Image (cartoon, rainbow, N blue to C red):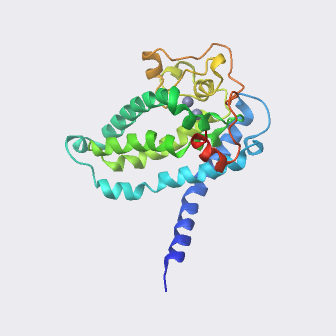
Amino acid sequence: MSTLPLEVVEMFGQTLVKVVPITIVLALVFSVLSYFWACNPGAPWWRKREIVTDVCYWFFVVFNIHDADELIAFYDNGHGPLSELPLWVQAAIFLILSDFMLYWLHRMYHGGGFWKYHAIHHSSEDLDWISAARFHPVNLFLGTVAVDVILLMAGISPNIMLWVGPFTTFHSAFVHANLNWTLGPFKYVLATPVFHRWHHTSQEEGGNTNFAGTFPVWDILFGTFRMPENRLPDNYGVHDQTIPSEIGGQLAYPFRR
Ligand SMILES: [Zn+2]
Ligand SMILES: [Zn+2]
């Protein structure tokens, strides 16, 4: 008798065991923080209009992150000169180089033919921590996945993912959270909620800025940094296009027309 159905159920169970606790922690942390320091007043994140859509994305994307075990086994312990550096140095190199590549990929997605894939990420009108996972798969593959694979192929040890993975999951939820935090002078060092929420505003409000995922230094260097003093961003989403609100329609969206 085939054990496949049982294996599928077991894998599904293992995913839930991994993803649910992280999700609960993030939900608690950002509910409390945005109760005190909301960037935009209004209903809490769980009353977002498209909450079901975002919960679906969340479980798909976080599931894939935790599928990294296979990737780690495939790339073994890294290779070549990079893999001989201390792990923390490799993690720093990974964070800086991947962020640099993602900055330019992000700018590519904002121009011309690639926008239709990235528009899905920008379709959240109620922007909150759980919006962090709303990405079209094409955007993910020709984005974080491609960049990870390039750096692993260059020899970086996949073991750094043990630190980098949780950091990027938390940090990307953080920059989307409904928080009025700029981190004062550190706004030039690390991407903050206000920094990234400006990126989600419309073109007219200056939305074509703040492309960096983690380090705003790329935006400062290449002239796309924008954080107006004494003002907070509001009004998010893509208003000039009709993007479906449910996940199936969103996945099909770039392929229509
Ligand atoms: Zn964008
Ligand atoms: Zn975003």
Residue at figure coordinates x 61%, y 17% from the top left = 206
Task: Name the image quarter holding the C terminus.
Answer: top right
Residue 145 horizontal/vertical position (percent): 43, 44
Is residue 27 depicted above or below 92 in this figure? below
In terms of image quadrants, where is residue 30?
A: top right
Front residue of 241 and 5: 241
Residue shown at 45%/46% (left/top)?
A: 165
- Figure disc tally: 0
Residue 235 is situated, as x and y percent measured from the top left of the image, at 72, 26
Q: Is 168 in front, or is 208?
A: 208
User: As drawn, which residue projects farthest toward the bottom?
Assistant: 1
**Image coordinates for residue 55, horizontal then vertical, percent:** 66, 50
Split into quadrants, the picture shows ligand 1 in the one at top right
Q: Nearer the viewer, residue 56 or 190?
A: 56
Q: Residue furthest front?
A: 257
Residue drawn at the location 64% of the way across and 35% of the way down:
177
Q: Is residue 144 above or below residue 39?
A: below
Along the line of sight, the residue nearer the viewer: 38 or 238: 238
Q: Quadrant of residue 179?
A: top right
Q: Position of residue 33 (x, y in %)?
A: 68, 36
Q: Residue at x 38, y 59 (%)?
A: 70
Q: Quadrant of residue 5?
A: bottom right
- View extreme (left): residue: 81
